[in-house]
Image: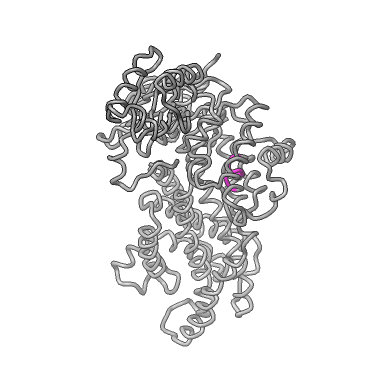
């Protein structure tokens, strides 16, 4: 599949000392939804600002559909739409007027203008409020209007910087549903930065994690989750049995015996017992669970409950972009 | 092609300004209060002081061009606040990602501010007539006077955008704006002829674009002495040219 964005060894140094980007390599497939995850100060926004021709890289190369973002910036601007993190519409005029001004800036011909504007309003579900002043809009409506402005020209690539920051769950869902149907209709490539792992998980085709100016991991959300570890199955061992069965042996000794037996199974990656709860890490839980239960039964141990947990994108994020203790001092928190 | 894009953006910026004005007209009316007080109160009182040589023109009439220009230029001088606000929000980033040159944004905004100034002046103009100010009834002169008002206001708006691109925050910008206003007004011929000033202030007044604008508007609207008008226009065109270029170059800095 053709690539929409190609980035090679991209470096950005601010004021000759701060390395915001440190040799980024990245490829984004055309007509896909791409999520860039990273803690604050990891270079997400810098990367997006370079790709949208706002600032120049110190070194390296970035292309949007074969146009170099530095040399062919005029061409790049014609095929991209961009929604910055901060609010970016004029609040003292109506939603329709905002779109009208952008339609004029982008040179949409006067014949098409009305249709294009109403299409964009419809795509974002804003027809009913189009003629109301933007200052009366809710946060979710403002965001959708901003995206509508960016969609006017049917861009080949849409850049969204933290598109749903500060929106309530239903507004987030509305934004994404509108975006997805637009993407489906026009084959737009969507490139977005986010802190919301669930959003990247639900809506993106591919994910990249950036940390300290470098891409540390790329893949689909499920690939990334699988790369972390398999499933963790927790068994709650019935307490009375452990205590009463082998009166000669101490509970500690019994625990040790079970651990050894389970660990001996060739599909088990790791096993721990803590407070009568045994956590077993395996590749494939559905296959492993009955076999482990057999072992426990043969030891005469019954179970109170079984729970299986798969790694989430949060775990992936924390593993590859951790550094939590360092960031916390500056009042940083993960937006999860 | 790139020129077309830029031209389009300039017109869009003017339209934006007009639409904003249409949605909220209170600003235009409230801003008309101060200049009307200058004419009605200051002008009436000072007209009894007959020491200011006005070549036989009534004092209120004499200061009307200055007050008219002052009211519009002050709006322009603070126009940069809009840019500072748009920088704090994401609007500027977004405009810079649109397919138009960055210069188009600056010049379009400056011109838009000039158009706003003309609307502002159109409100004060009839009030001045009611106060008894006698304008020269020559439509071409009046048009030329408004053209001057438009050009000089646009120039000061560009100056304001230039200051905004260096200051970047509201507070710092307000400080500089306030500091500019007083000398701009008093070191000009708006309220009294330059010949009354000490030599030091005179040399500042000669460099003040407002002096040329007041001279032209006074000649065209009040005294009918238009001998200096071509020179005045040349001075203001030169000011606009220089400040448009400087502001455009400096504008890049605002988003960095």
Q: Which x, y percent locates residue A35?
A: 49, 30
Q: Which x, y percent locates residue A6?
A: 46, 20
Q: Nearer the viewer, residue A108 or A184?
A: A184
Q: Nearer the viewer, residue B89 or B62?
A: B89
The residue depicted at 40 percent of the width and 41 percent of the height is: A334
Q: Which x, y percent locates residue B141?
A: 61, 62
The residue depicted at 62 percent of the width and 64 percent of the height is: B25
- Does residue B175 appear anywhere in the picture? yes
Relative vertical location of residue A199 with respect to residue B153 in this rendering, above or below: above
Horizontally, is A287 left or right of B202 in the view? right
Which residue reaches farthest bottom?
A: B48
The magenta region covers A142-147
- Say which quadrant the C terminus of chain A sits in: top left
Q: Main secondary structure of the magenta part?
A: helix
Which residue reaches farthest top?
A: A266
Question: Which colour scheme appears in the figure?
Answer: one colour
The residue depicted at 55 percent of the width and 38 percent of the height is: B6
Q: Nearer the viewer, residue B38 or A322?
A: A322
Indicate whether residue A146 is drawn in magenta: yes
Horizontally, is A120 left or right of A247 in the view? right
């Amino acid at each position: 599949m053709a690539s929409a964005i190609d980035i090679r060894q991209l470096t950005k140094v601010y004021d000759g000392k701060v390395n915001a980007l440190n040799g980024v390599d990245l490829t984004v497939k055309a007509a896909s939804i791409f999520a860039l995850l990273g803690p604050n100060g990891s270079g997400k926004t810098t990367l997006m600002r370079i790709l949208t021709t706002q600032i120049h890289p110190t070194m390296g190369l970035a292309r949007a559909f074969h146009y170099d973002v530095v040399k062919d910036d005029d061409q790049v601007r014609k095929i991209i739409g961009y929604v910055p993190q901060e609010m970016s519409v004029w609040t003292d005029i109506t939603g329709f007027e905002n779109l009208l001004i952008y339609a004029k800036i982008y040179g949409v011909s006067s014949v098409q203008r009305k249709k294009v504007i109403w299409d964009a309003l419809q795509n974002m579900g804003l027809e009913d409020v189009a003629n109301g002043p933007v200052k009366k809009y809710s946060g979710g409506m403002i965001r959708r209007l901003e995206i509508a402005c960016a969609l006017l020209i049917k861009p080949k690539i849409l850049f969204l910087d933290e598109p749903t920051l500060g929106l309530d769950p239903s507004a987030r869902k509305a934004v994404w549903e509108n975006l997805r149907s637009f993407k489906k209709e026009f084959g737009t490539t969507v490139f977005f930065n986010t802190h919301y792992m669930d959003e990247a998980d639900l809506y993106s085709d591919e994910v990249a994690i950036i940390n300290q100016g470098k891409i540390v991991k790329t893949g689909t959300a499920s690939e990334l989750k699988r790369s972390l570890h398999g499933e963790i199955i927790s068994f709650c061992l019935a307490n009375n049995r452990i205590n009463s069965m082998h009166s000669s042996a101490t509970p500690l000794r019994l625990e040790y015996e079970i651990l050894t037996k389970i660990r001996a199974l060739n599909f088990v990656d790791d096993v721990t017992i803590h407070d009568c709860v045994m956590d077993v890490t395996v590749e494939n839980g559905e296959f492993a669970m009955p076999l482990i239960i057999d072992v426990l039964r043969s030891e005469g141990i019954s179970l109170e409950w079984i729970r299986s947990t798969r790694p989430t994108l949060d775990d992936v994020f924390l593993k590859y972009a951790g550094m939590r203790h360092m960031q916390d001092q500056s009042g940083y928190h993960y937006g999860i | 092609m790139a020129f077309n894009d830029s031209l389009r953006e300039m017109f869009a910026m003017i339209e934006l300004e007009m639409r904003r004005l249409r949605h909220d007209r209170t600003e235009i009316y409230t801003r008309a209060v101060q200049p009307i007080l200058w004419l009605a109160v200051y002008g009436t009182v000072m007209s009894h002081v007959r020491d200011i040589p006005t070549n036989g023109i009534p004092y209120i009439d004499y200061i009307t061009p200055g007050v008219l220009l002052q009211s519009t230029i002050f709006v322009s001088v603070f126009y940069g606040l809009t840019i500072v606000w748009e920088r704090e929000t994401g609007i500027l980033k977004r405009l810079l990602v649109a397919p138009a040159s960055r210069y188009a944004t600056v010049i379009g905004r400056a011109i838009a501010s000039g158009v706003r100034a003309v609307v502002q002046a159109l409100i004060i103009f009839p009030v001045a007539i009611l106060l008894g100010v006698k304008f020269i009834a020559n439509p071409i002169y009046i048009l030329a006077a408004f053209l001057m008002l438009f050009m000089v206001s646009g120039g000061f708006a560009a100056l304001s955008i230039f200051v905004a691109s260096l200051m970047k925050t509201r507070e710092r910008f307000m400080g500089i704006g306030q500091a500019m206003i007083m000398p701009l007004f008093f070191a000009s011929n708006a309220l009294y002829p330059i010949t009354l000033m000490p030599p030091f202030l005179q040399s500042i007044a000669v460099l003040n674009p407002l002096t040329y604008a007041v001279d032209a508007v006074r000649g065209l609207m009040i005294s009918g002495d238009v001998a200096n008008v071509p020179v005045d226009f040349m001075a203001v065109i030169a000011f606009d040219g220089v400040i448009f270029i400087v502001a455009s170059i400096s504008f890049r800095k605002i988003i960095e």
